[in-house]
Image (cartoon, helix red, strand yellow):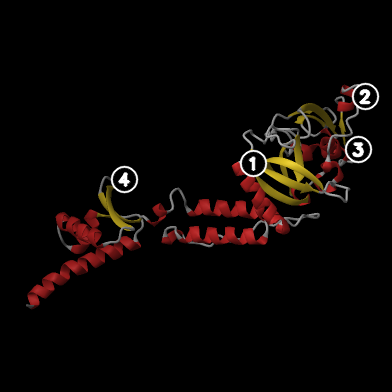
């Protein structure tokens, strides 16, 4: 009886020893090494590994493959990470960095939800990859900022209306005015620029589902928004992300001379996707950009205090004296967005 117990105990001891060795060695162990340590044949090693695999959960597996020396090796692998397709810890850290970049513009409740989601995602990764995703968050030095916490419901309503192409009734308080105005609106996209959120879309005439003129609102100055029961069927967003500024008019090409003292600041940044920079003998540059907001471009140039100047004709000169003062330009009245 004692001989039978001993004969049963040896395979168990061998299996435990193999399992522990595989857990301790992430690079795998050769079959030859296991054969020598267990003092058995290669066939017995294979049988022990098969017995262990049959006893493991679906998350763990011992795989067999040749190493660089063409020796058969065994390695213990985890499939836990496969439960989160396409994710590794580095990608979770990347998402955490994106969270930090967006944090100054998001309500605290939204940041809390994002934090909890990232932690839950990290906990689904392989045991060896579990680490904190909080880290040391990126901090921002603000010269004044807008608290979007009270506007979380407006953002939610706009996002749903944009996704479903739903017509909205909107009340908006323009800059430098005390009375809100009402609009029938087809929202197209929420745009963030220099710490300020805007919504861009089309004004709709009463009873019409056809696009009217393109219009941009400062999101925090929307006092009320109510989704209606009508739906529009056109693209309400005009992508002008390649141009300088928000969409206020058709694209225009402008050249700006920048003095040497401000040239490095301008060189270091992209102002328009199709910009060109011409170096000047005095150390300055000529920046050529496409803009859809000339008043915004002018305000930006003024912010350099005489070190920059628009050298192409203005829209007033091009239009031969036509009045262009009616075009909206909230950016010119908002000094926070003139420069870093």
Task: Say if mark 1 contacts mark 4, CB within 8 Å.
Answer: no
Residue at x 21%, y 57% (from the top left corner): 50
Identify residue for label 2: 321
Identify residue for label 4: 68
- Of label 1 and label 4, which has the lower sequence position? 4
Query: In the drawing, what numbered circle is on residue 164?
Result: none
Q: Position of residue 273 (x, y in %)?
A: 69, 32
Identify residue for label 3: 306
Res. 191 visible in picture:
no
Task: Say if mark 4 contacts mark 3, CB within 8 Å.
Answer: no
- Of label 4 and label 3, which has the lower sequence position? 4
Q: Position of residue 247 (x, y in %)?
A: 75, 35
- Of label 2 and label 3, which has the lower sequence position? 3
Q: Quadrant of residue 314?
A: top right
Identify residue for label 1: 230
Q: Position of residue 130 (x, y in %)?
A: 47, 61
């Amino acid at each position: 009886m004692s001989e039978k117990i001993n004969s049963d105990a040896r395979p168990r001891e061998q299996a435990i020893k193999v399992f522990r060795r595989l857990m301790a060695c992430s690079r795998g162990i050769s079959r030859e090494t296991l054969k020598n340590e267990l003092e058995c044949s290669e066939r017995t090693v294979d049988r022990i590994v098969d017995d262990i695999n049959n006893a493991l959960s679906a998350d763990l597996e011992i795989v067999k493959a040749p190493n660089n020396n063409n020796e058969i090796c065994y390695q213990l692998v985890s499939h836990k990470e496969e439960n989160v397709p396409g994710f590794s810890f580095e990608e979770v850290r990347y998402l955490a960095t994106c969270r930090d970049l967006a944090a100054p513009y998001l309500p605290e409740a939204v940041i809390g939800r994002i934090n909890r989601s990232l932690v839950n995602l990290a906990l689904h990764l392989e045991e060896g990859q579990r680490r904190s995703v909080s880290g040391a968050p990126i901090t921002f030095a603000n010269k004044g900022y807008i608290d979007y916490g009270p506007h979380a419901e407006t953002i939610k309503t706009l996002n749903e209306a944009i996704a479903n192409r739903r017509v909205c009734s909107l009340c908006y308080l323009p800059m430098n005015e005390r009375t809100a105005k009402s609009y029938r609106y087809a929202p197209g996209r929420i745009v963030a620029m220099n710490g300020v959120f805007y919504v861009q879309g089309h004004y709709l005439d009463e009873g019409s589902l056809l696009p009217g003129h393109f219009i941009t609102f400062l999101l925090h100055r929307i006092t009320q928004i109510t989704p209606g029961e009508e739906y529009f069927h056109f693209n309400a967003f005009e992508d002008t992300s390649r141009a300088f500024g928000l969409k206020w008019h058709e694209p225009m090409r402008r050249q700006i001379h920048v003095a040497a003292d401000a040239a490095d600041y301008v060189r270091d940044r992209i102002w328009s996707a199709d910009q060109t920079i011409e170096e000047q003998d005095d150390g300055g540059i000529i920046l050529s950009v496409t803009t859809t907001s000339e008043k915004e471009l002018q305000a930006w140039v003024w912010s350099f205090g005489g070190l920059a100047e628009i050298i192409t004709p203005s829209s007033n000169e091009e239009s031969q004296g036509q009045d262009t003062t009616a075009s909206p330009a909230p950016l010119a009245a908002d000094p926070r967005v003139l420069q870093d």
